[in-house]
Structure formats: structure tokens, C-alpha cells
Image: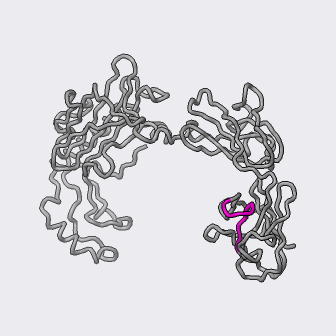
């Protein structure tokens, strides 16, 4: 829904009073007769603008700052023209943020852009899954806020290829001689020609079958295929056994959703959209985890084709078979990997008992499999266990400051990444 401040269509002014809430009609007047726009009714209140009086007086002294009734009429006519343009196609009122990302692009960008020229495109071609306007394949909106005529025609599609521009024409919703100011599409040069200080809307009328339109140049590959809907994975995973809406699967890009989970035994799994009513499996049954022993496994769903997503083969990405766990840091007495830093492994948990720690002192550490870079876990790779004492992130290190003197136990579940610190 568009938002417009009352009087904006009439060049309404508050005479430089930037906070007019308590100042009545003196600064807030709207003249619907279009004789005056309420400019230059005196300096604004000193309580907020005294320091700006010199600058405001210079603006008041500019003879071009006061619009005439004919200027206000032109603005009112242009405003109504904008409303008619907005109503000319449903492409100007896209129904969701996902559709905006899929369809809307800005072409005059980057270090080589022409300053003062906005080139916006709206796509409705055959790369879009829904057809929002059966009469139009694409729209181009150009705003030329420069004193010079501008030309533009360098459009590229979602694969980086140059688009062959053809079939565009100035929208017939424009009023003759107003905002578009004689703008046109040059079919031979394949460029849009827009005079100085003008706004022009061009449309590509559909000729029979749906054409290519104007696919967005770069964003399409990064848009989650399911939009705002969430994807989940369900299986025999620790903490969430076969719950269809417990483990969210993030979007990785290029149409693929993926998540890494720890396994201590073989299990099947499926992807869901939050319930068993909508699931993606392997031949109607559970998908195999390809279990190769204790470790972290990655599970992926390729949803490039949203009508028929494909479950990709599960892969072991970090094996913990035969691995020892260490806790180098000041909490264990040193940042090395000597036996004094080694933890006791019990199933999928590694446990370490500290020496006596002092209240109020900060003790830092990380968790590894015996060497830096091997199964290394810092503060950003762990989560707090349900009953853990608080710890924090200090430049990537896990930092623990006990409130009382004492000996503490550090438990790390390397499959769920839950870290629990508790009094011993």
C-alpha cells in the first residue's frame, strides 16, 4: 500500500518548520484551491531551528523557491498520472517480498553508472513461475533527474548474457507532454531515450507466446526456492527424534538447502515442510544416512525445481572415530595439546574437570581433537547446554568467569555441540 503525506501532491510546504506537530494551521495548512503551497510564512520556531536561520533565510531569498499556481497544477497533474501508471499493470503491485526479489532489478548501478539516472525493471517473462499480467512481458521505469538527455540499453539477464531488447514502447497511460516529455524506445539502437528532467514508463507488450522479458541480473540464484517457507529434516537425530518441525534446514544457495548433524548410529531421514503432510523422501521411504561411524554428516535437498525437489546423498564431513578431545586454554592450565589438556570421552561427550578456579577471573579455552584446526570449536561453534553456567565469546575463545571459587566440570557433546559448565 503506498503512503503519501497529505498535500504532497500539491507541493505543500511547512515553511521549513521541520517539527510542526504543535504548530496548528500556520505551518500545516493545505490549500486545496491550489493557489498557494504555504511556503515562506515566516521563520520556523527558534527552539529547534535557530542555528539554521542563516541557511533558511538564503533559501527564502531564492526567487525560484516559490512555486506559482501553474507549478502546483502541473504537480497535481503529474501525481494523478503516476496513480494511473501504477494502476495500469499488476506488476506495479507485486504481492510479496519474494516476488519483488525475483522480478525487480536496478540496471544503472556500480562505479560506471550514470549519476542521476534510475533504471528499474520489472520482469514478467517466461523465467517467472507465475504470469501476473497476461498482456506484458516486462516494464522499464526510468527517472532522469539530470539536465541532459540520457540513453540506456545495457541490460543483462540472470546468466550474465546481454538481453536483446525489442518490442518496447512508451506506456500509453502517460499524458501527452507531461512527465515523459517525449521519451521513446529506439528499436534500431535498442536503447531507451529519456529527455532531461523526465520520468518514463515503458512496457513490452506480449506478442503471442510469453517472451523472455527482463530477468533480474544477479539475484535469482540466491533466492530460496520455497521463499519464506521453512524446510526441516526429521530422522533419528539426537534431541529431535523423528520430529517433522524441530530441525530447521537453512538455505545454502543455488537452490540447495542443507544442514550438518551429528550421528552415533545409522538412521534414515526425510525432509519436510513442517509436517508429515508435505515431505521429500527417497522413493517413498526413508533416505539412507550413509553412516560410516561417529561424526558429523551433511544432508542436502536440491529444490532448484520446486515441483520436484531431489534429496542429495548424505556425506560424512567430519569423522570422530578414534579421535581424542582436548581443551587447550587458561581454564586447563595451558594453550597446548599435552595430556594435561586431554578430556575423557564418554560416548558422544568429552568431559574435563578443572583445577580450582577463582571467582571473578575469566578463563578462556577452545575444544579440539588434538591439534589446532582439527575439529576445532570456538565460541561460535557451540551452544549452551540446558543447565550450563553462563559463558561468553571473547574474540572467538570460549570465556567463563565463575561467580564462586571452586572446581568445575566442562562437558561437551560433540554431536549436538552443547557445552555445559557446572560445579563439580
Q: Which image quadrant: the C terminus?
A: bottom right
Considering only vertical position in the picture, is 15 above or below 310? below
Between 2 and 160, the residue placed more toward the observer is 160
Considering only vertical position in the picture, is 270 above or below 211? below
- Tell me what residue is drawn at x 69 percent, y 47 percent: 317
Residue 230 visible? The answer is yes
Q: Is residue 304 left or right of residue 134?
A: right
The stretch of residues the image draws in magenta is: 364-373
Name the residue furthest top: 208
Q: Quadrant of residue 137?
A: top left
Estimate the x, y position of residue 209 in percent, counting from the top left.
39, 18
- Tell me what residue is drawn at x 36 percent, y 66 percent: 19
Estimate the x, y position of residue 66 in percent, counting from the top left.
16, 58
Between 171 and 348, the residue placed more toward the observer is 348
Q: Magenta segment: does it hold 368?
A: yes
- State how the image is colored: one colour
Considering only vertical position in the picture, is 323 above or below 316? below
Q: Main secondary structure of the magenta part?
A: loop
Q: Quadrant of residue 229?
A: top right
Estimate the x, y position of residue 147 in percent, counting from the top left.
16, 49
- Tell me what residue is drawn at x 30 percent, y 30 percent: 203
Name the residue furthest left: 63
Estimate the x, y position of residue 353 in percent, counting from the top left.
84, 71
Residue 278 visible? The answer is no
Q: Which image quadrant: the N terminus?
A: top left
Q: Is residue 68 left or right of residue 159?
A: left
Q: Magenta segment: does it hold 138?
A: no
Total numbered labels: 0
Q: Quadrant of residue 416?
A: bottom right
- Tell me what residue is drawn at x 35 percent, y 65 percent: 20
Amino acid at each position: 500500500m503506498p503512503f503519501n503525506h497529505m498535500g504532497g501532491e500539491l507541493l505543500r510546504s511547512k515553511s521549513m518548520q521541520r517539527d510542526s506537530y504543535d504548530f496548528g494551521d500556520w505551518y500545516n495548512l493545505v490549500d486545496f484551491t491550489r493557489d498557494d503551497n504555504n511556503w515562506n510564512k515566516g521563520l520556523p520556531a527558534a527552539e529547534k531551528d535557530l542555528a539554521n536561520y542563516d541557511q533558511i533565510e538564503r533559501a527564502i531569498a531564492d526567487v525560484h523557491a516559490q512555486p506559482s499556481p501553474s507549478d502546483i497544477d502541473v504537480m497535481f497533474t503529474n501525481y494523478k498520472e503516476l496513480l494511473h501508471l501504477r494502476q495500469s499493470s499488476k506488476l506495479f503491485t507485486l504481492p510479496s517480498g519474494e516476488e519483488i526479489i525475483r522480478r525487480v532489478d536496478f540496471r544503472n548501478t556500480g562505479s560506471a553508472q550514470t549519476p542521476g539516472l534510475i533504471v528499474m525493471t520489472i520482469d514478467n517473462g517466461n523465467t517467472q513461475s507465475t504470469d501476473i499480467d497476461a498482456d506484458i512481458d516486462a516494464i522499464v521505469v526510468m527517472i532522469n533527474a539530470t539536465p541532459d538527455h540520457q540513453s540506456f540499453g545495457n541490460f543483462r539477464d540472470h546468466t550474465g548474457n546481454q538481453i536483446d531488447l525489442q518490442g518496447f514502447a512508451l506506456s500509453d497511460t502517460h499524458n501527452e507532454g507531461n512527465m515523459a516529455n517525449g521519451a521513446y524506445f529506439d528499436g534500431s539502437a535498442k536503447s531507451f531515450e529519456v529527455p532531461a528532467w523526465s520520468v518514463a514508463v515503458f512496457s513490452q507488450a506480449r506478442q503471442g507466446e510469453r517472451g523472455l522479458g527482463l530477468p533480474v541480473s544477479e539475484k535469482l540464484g540466491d533466492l530460496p526456492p520455497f521463499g519464506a517457507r521453512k524446510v526441516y529434516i526429521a530422522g533419528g537425530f539426537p534431541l529431535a527424534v523423528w520430529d517433522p518441525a524441530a530441525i530447521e534446514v537453512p538455505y545454502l544457495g543455488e537452490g540447495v538447502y542443507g544442514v550438518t548433524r551429528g550421528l552415533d548410529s545409522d538412521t534414515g531421514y526425510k525432509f519436510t515442510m513442517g509436517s508429515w503432510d508435505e515431505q521429500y523422501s527417497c522413493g517413498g521411504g526413508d533416505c539412507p544416512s550413509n553412516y560410516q561411524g561417529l561424526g558429523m554428516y551433511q544432508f542436502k535437498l536440491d529444490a532448484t525445481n520446486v515441483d520436484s525437489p531431489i534429496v542429495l546423498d548424505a556425506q560424512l564431513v567430519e569423522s570422530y572415530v578414534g579421535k581424542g578431545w582436548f581443551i587447550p586454554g587458561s581454564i586447563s592450565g595451558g594453550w597446548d595439546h599435552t595430556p594435561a589438556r586431554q578430556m575423557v570421552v564418554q560416548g558422544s561427550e568429552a568431559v574435563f574437570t578443572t583445577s580450582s578456579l577463582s571467582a571473578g577471573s575469566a578463563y578462556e579455552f577452545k575444544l579440539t581433537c588434538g591439534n589446532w584446526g582439527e575439529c576445532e570449536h570456538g565460541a561460535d561453534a557451540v551452544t549452551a547446554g540446558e543447565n550450563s553456567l553462563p559463558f561468553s565469546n571473547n574474540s572467538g575463545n570460549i570465556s567463563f568467569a565463575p561467580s564462586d571459587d571452586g572446581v568445575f566440570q566442562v562437558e561437551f557433546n560433540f554431536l549436538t555441540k552443547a557445552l555445559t559448565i557446572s560445579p563439580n
